Image: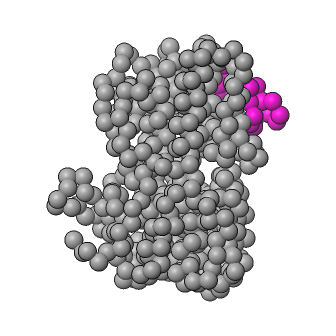
Amino acid sequence: MNTNDIRINLPASKSMSNRWLMINHITGSHFRIGKLSTSADTRLLRKLLAQVEENAAAERSDSDLYYCDNAGSVARFMMPLLAVTPGYHVLSGDDRLRERPMAPIIDALRQMGLRVECTEKEGFLPVQIQGGVPVRRTVSVDPLLSSQFVSALLLVAPRLPEGISLTMTQRPTSRPYIEMTADALRMAGIEVRRSSNGRTYYVQPLQGKPKAASITIERDWSSASYFYTMAMLRPGTRIRLLGLQLDSCQGDSAADGFFRQLGVVSTEVRSPYRAAGRSITIQGGGEMVKSIQFNCIDCPDLVPTFAVAAAAAGVRTILKGVGNIALKESDRMVAITNELRRMGGRVNSTGDELHILPSALKPTEMVRTYGDHRMAMAFAPLRLRFPDLKIENPEVVDKSFPEFWEEFEKVLAC
C-alpha cells in the first residue's frame, strides 16, 4: 500500500441509503443499516418517514404537510407511500421542486385507483393525497423523465395487498437505479421478477416478517466523480477513494470508463488487514483520446462532471442522452452552458446532446451554482488550475456530500 496516497473519505451512497430507508419502513424496521448517508436528502427522508409513523400512532384526522424542500427523489418516494397510508396528506416543496415534473407518478397512482389531487398546477406539487387501498395492481409508467417514478412504485409494492405489475412505456433514464431498487428488494426477501423484454416488473406483497439482517451501504460513485477530475488536473498524483469498488450496481460507476479516455486510470486494491478494505486508487497523466462520444442516459448526474472535465482537458466531446438534465435541481443544460461559456468554453446543446469543443478555459471570479450541489462540486476542481476561483453558495454540497470541501482541501493542499 502506498502511504503517500491522498486518502479521500467518500460519503455513503445517497441512492442506496434512501432505498433501504424506504424498505425498512415498509417491512417494519427489520434491517440494521450500516454507514447510512449523511446527506441532507437522506436526513430529510428519515425525518419524513418518522413523521409518517408519528401521525399513524396519533391517528390524525386532519391533513398533515410533508415538506420535501428541493429533494425530487424524496418527494417521488414519499408520494406512493402516502397514497397507501390511511389519512389525508399534503406533499409539497420549494419553488424549484414545484417546477419539477410529477405527472408520470401521479398518473400511475390514479390508474391504481388512488386519490391524488394537484392543488395548483396539474402534474406538479403540491398535491393533496387521501391514503387508501389500490383497486388495481397493474400499472403503466412513463420513465423517460426520471427512473425515480419506477423505483418509487416498486418500493411501496410490498405493502400492497396484491403487489404490483409495472410496465414501462418506453426506455427509462438511469436504468441502473431501477435495478438497484429491484436488487435491494430481493435482498430484503421480497420476490421481484422482470419480464424477458425488460419492460415489466412484478413485485409480490410482503409475506410475513423478513429475516433481520445487517445492510452496509456502498460508498457513493457520484461523489467519487469529482475526484477523477482532480486526478486529471494533477497528473501523477495518486488519490485513494476509500471504500469504493469497481464492480458496483451504481450507474455512476460509469465515471471510470469516461475518465479512462482522459488519461485517468483506476485500480482497485484490497487491504490485507481488513476483510472489507476495498478501495480504488486513481491517477491521471495517461494518454488522452482526441475525441469522446459518451451516452449518459444511465448516468445523467455525471453530466456536469464530464462537461467540466472535457472542457478543462480541451478534448472534443459529445455527451448523449442528456435531455432530462434540464429537470434536475437546476436546469443543468443552461447552467453548464452558461458557466463554461463565461470561462471561455465552447459549448453547444442540440436536443438530447451536449457538445464540448476544444478551447482554453480562463479564470472567472465566481462560478454560479444555481442552488445546485452538483454544479458546485463539478466546477470546484478547476480551483486546482485557477486558485482564486470562487464557488457561489458552497454550502449547497450538503445535499449529497456534506464533507466535500474538507476532502477537497486534501487534494488542493497537495
- Residue 177, relative to residue 197: is it above or below? below
Q: Please say whether residue 63 is one of the residues in the magenta stretch.
A: no
Residue sitting farthest toward the right: 120
Provide the residue span drawn in magenta: 107-128
- Residue 329, relative to residue 377: is it above or below? above
Seen in the image, is 231 located left or right of residue 134? left
Q: Is residue 258 visible?
A: no
Seen in the image, is 174 located left or right of residue 275? right
**Quadrant of the image for the C terminus?**
bottom left
Name which residue lies at 56% across and 36% down: 47
- Residue 316, relative to residue 395: is it above or below? below
Q: Is residue 70 visible?
A: yes
Name which residue lies at 47% across and 35% down: 21
The residue lying toward the viewer, choosing from 322 and 198, is 322
Q: How many marks?
A: 0
Name which residue lies at 74% across and 26% down: 128
- Residue 234 lies, in percent from the top left, at 44, 82
Q: Please say whether residue 118 is one of the residues in the magenta stretch.
A: yes
The part of the image, by quadrant, that contains residue 150 is top right
- Residue 381 lies, in percent from the top left, at 53, 74
Name which residue lies at 48% across and 49% down: 38
- Residue 310 lies, in percent from the top left, at 55, 75
- Residue 65, relative to residue 374: is it above or below? above
- Residue 201 lies, in percent from the top left, at 48, 30
